[in-house]
């Protein structure tokens, strides 16, 4: 709990206690009024001040003005009619309770999300003069060898030069199973070194490393607002003036009608009370805070599952996807050739592999690499001489005095060997010794372990169509599509052909609410990623190209994470819709009841404070399932003070006012506040000097901040 929250809680408790005491005192007249005004001023003075500042700054139509009019009016009625002061005080008291709860809930969720995503260490260990020195990672140059001790997080991307260990990659991929790491392996910042001492040569600067890029993208996600958030912004601008006008009409028109047309008593007090109740009910707090909180919680939960979502608009679109188009190589398959079958004719399978691997020993072809990876025992005493690579056919060599041919059917024809085709799908490597055919080996791009499960999970979640696009030949594509139970596939495609196919699928969805997602490697498929409704990068693991090209990045090679991302997106959208329809529905119902005199101030308090609390609690459900690593990283210094501003407000209303104040500043093209991350990003007009503009932005925002920070 922050100091401000403690002070406000103290105000609430003191005001509540004084109100109870005032109700028990035998006071009348002015003494009674003063006894109730004291707790009212204690608990509500900041609301009254903010309402006044809004009027002075010509921005009066906000929740503070609504609450001020309603409570002051209720007290004024009690003075005129010598009635009950507790209703007006209770409205302000419970409003402040709701505001305190909202501040606490938002602060708690903000801390939780920060813990989930702040995966950058604050220090790096560099050896100087024979001892380890802890330095700021920003000061570590590319190529520097850093030391990562057991239990520490890797601060900067690099390559292990010495040491072996196991790494906890949960912060990046969401996977809890540790990964082995040894000399020569690439390691990413944000991973935790679990066991051995590692020496890592850095390959990137700290600001460009994986952990920093992830955090930067998540922090910027607030700039890309969803349709639901945009609706709430437009709704609030129209809604508040409308309800103020409706309340004024409710206070004036019915009494005039009763007096002029019906010849009845106008009953000014009754209709004024109904109008004041109407104003209390109408406060849009629940919508203003719960909708952005829902999206940010969903983005935070997705990050901990190893899914990086660049904005709430992409989360919203992903929830509507019913067609998923996949690239094949590197997405559904591993993208590397492996020996999948060995079919000998006259010798043992391992001996067939032995001959082929020895002949391909000196070749750099990917097929040769696959054969050598399958048979690693090169030092087995065999003598390999006279190696000849025959372009377009294969390799010929002498192994222990025997002439061995390893290659395709054309090479078998050259060797005079009677070969036969294979029914398996893949690249067929035939082998002959001294002109005699001894068998063949099948090399293929292996389907990922979870690809079939991923397709099944997508279908289970309501995805209507799964399609694969590939540049491979039809036989290979058909085999992969069959094994994964894909709905359709298109083979032998060039990059521009993939774009054309996606265009066809998008045209078929024209006029519907359905959306199309394309899943690729984020590098070769950039044009298609950009054209799809949602571009998803697979197998990125820190690839800058993938992160730049895609709207959503799955931080490991597991295609099943797409189903996880879609489940999170749909859950988030359910929560958003529940909050929108629930909040508006309850308010409209109680507004009607209030206008008819069937709902009093206590019902109004529930419609305002009660609905707000329920909406915030519901929004926090989007974080369920997201688990942090239990560590809280100290806040780092601002990375780019020229383009960002640290805000410190607890209410979305004040954050929106800061955004508007920044936008009105000379030299600013646009400004976006990420309320959950407490940051503002500023975009400057062409020709403007950030060093001159930012002080004006900070001054404008500080004025709003000072209005918000009113303490006892």
Image (cartoon, helix red, strand yellow):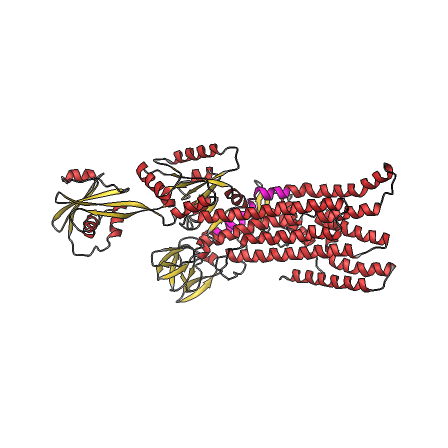
Q: What residue lies at 81% left-to-right and 45% top-to-bottom?
A: 271
Q: Is residue 658 left or right of residue 314?
A: right
Residue 637: give x, y in percent of width and height. Answer: 54, 57
Residue 550 inside the magenta-drawn segment: no
Residue 25: give x, y in percent of width and height. Answer: 83, 64
Viewer-side residue, 106 vs 267: 267
Main SS of the magenta segment? helix
Residue 511: give x, y in percent of width and height. Answer: 52, 33
Q: Which residues are magenta?
A: 214-233
Q: Quadrant of residue 91?
A: bottom right
Residue 672: give x, y in percent of width and height. Answer: 59, 46
Viewer-side residue, 251 vs 556: 251
Q: Is residue 172 visible?
A: yes
61 w.r.t. 512: above or below: below
User: Which quadrant would the N terminus be assigned to in this image?
Assistant: bottom right
Q: Quadrant of residue 131?
A: bottom left
Q: Is residue 219 left or right of residue 428?
A: right
């Amino acid at each position: 709990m922050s100091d401000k929250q403690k002070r406000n809680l103290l105000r609430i408790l003191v005001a509540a206690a004084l109100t109870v005491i005032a109700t028990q005192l035998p006071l009348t007249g002015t003494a009674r009024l003063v006894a109730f005004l004291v707790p009212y001023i204690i608990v509500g003075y900041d609301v009254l001040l903010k309402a006044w500042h809004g009027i002075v700054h010509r921005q009066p139509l906000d929740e503070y003005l609504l609450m001020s009019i309603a409570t002051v009016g209720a007290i004024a009625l009690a003075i005129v009619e010598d009635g009950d002061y507790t209703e007006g005080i209770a409205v302000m008291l419970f409003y402040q309770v709701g505001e305190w709860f909202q501040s606490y809930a938002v602060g708690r969720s903000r801390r939780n999300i920060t813990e989930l995503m702040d995966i950058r260490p604050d220090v790096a260990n560099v050896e100087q003069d024979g001892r380890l020195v802890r330095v700021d990672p920003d000061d570590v140059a590319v190529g520097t060898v850093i030391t990562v001790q057991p239990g520490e997080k890797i601060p900067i991307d690099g390559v292990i030069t010495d040491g072996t260990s196991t790494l906890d990659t949960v912060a990046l991929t969401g996977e809890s199973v540790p990964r082995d790491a040894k000399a020569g392996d690439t390691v990413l910042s944000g991973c935790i070194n679990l066991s051995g001492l590692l020496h890592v040569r850095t390959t990137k600067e700290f600001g460009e490393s994986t952990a920093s890029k992830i955090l930067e993208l998540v922090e910027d996600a607030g700039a890309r607002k969803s349709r639901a958030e945009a609706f709430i912004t437009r709704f609030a601008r129209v809604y508040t003036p409308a309800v103020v006008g409706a309340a004024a009409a409710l206070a004036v028109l019915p009494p005039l009608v009763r007096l002029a047309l019906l010849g009845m008593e106008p009953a000014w007090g009754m209709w004024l009370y109904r109008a004041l109740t109407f104003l209390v009910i109408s406060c849009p707090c629940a919508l203003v805070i719960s909708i952005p909180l829902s999206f940010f919680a969903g983005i935070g939960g997705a990050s901990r599952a190893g899914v990086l979502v660049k904005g709430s608009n992409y989360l919203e679109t992903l929830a509507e996807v019913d067609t998923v188009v996949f690239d094949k190589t590197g997405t559904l398959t591993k993208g590397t050739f492996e020996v999948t079958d060995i079919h000998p004719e006259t010798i043992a399978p391992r001996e067939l592999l032995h001959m082929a691997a020895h002949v391909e020993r000196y070749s750099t072809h990917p097929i040769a690499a696959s054969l050598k990876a399958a048979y690693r025992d090169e030092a087995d005493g065999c003598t390999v001489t006279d190696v000849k690579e025959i372009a377009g056919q294969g390799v010929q060599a002498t192994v222990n005095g025997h002439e061995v041919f390893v290659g395709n059917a054309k090479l078998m024809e050259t060797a005079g060997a009677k070969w036969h085709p294979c029914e398996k799908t893949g690249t067929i490597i035939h082998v002959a010794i001294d002109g005699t055919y001894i068998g063949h080996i099948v090399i293929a791009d292996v389907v990922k372990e979870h690809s079939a499960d991923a397709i099944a999970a997508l279908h289970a979640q309501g995805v209507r169509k799964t399609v694969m696009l590939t540049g491979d030949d039809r036989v290979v594509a058909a085999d992969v599509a069959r094994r994964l139970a894909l709905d359709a596939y298109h083979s032998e495609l060039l990059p521009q052909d993939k774009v054309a196919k996606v265009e066809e699928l998008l045209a078929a969805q024209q006029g519907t609410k359905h959306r199309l997602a394309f899943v690729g490697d984020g590098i070769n498929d950039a044009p298609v990623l950009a054209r799809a409704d949602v571009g998803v990068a697979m197998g990125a693991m820190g690839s800058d190209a993938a992160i730049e090209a895609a709207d959503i990045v799955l931080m490991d090679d597991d295609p099943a994470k797409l189903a996880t991302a879609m489940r999170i997106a749909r859950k988030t959208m359910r929560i958003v819709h529940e909050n929108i329809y629930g909040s508006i529905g309850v308010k409209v119902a109680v507004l009607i009841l209030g206008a008819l005199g069937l709902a009093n101030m206590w019902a109004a308090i529930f419609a305002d404070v009660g609905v707000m609390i329920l909406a915030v609690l519901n929004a926090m459900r989007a974080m369920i399932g997201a688990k942090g690593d239990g560590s809280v990283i100290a806040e780092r210094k601002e990375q780019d003070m020229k383009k960002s501003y640290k805000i410190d407000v607890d209410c979305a209303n004040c954050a929106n006012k800061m955004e508007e104040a920044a936008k009105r500043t000379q030299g600013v093209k646009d400004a976006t506040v990420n309320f959950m991350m407490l940051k503002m990003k500023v975009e400057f007009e062409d020709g403007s000097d950030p060093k001159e503009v930012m002080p004006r932005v900070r001054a404008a925002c500080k004025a709003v901040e000072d209005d918000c920070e009113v303490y006892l």
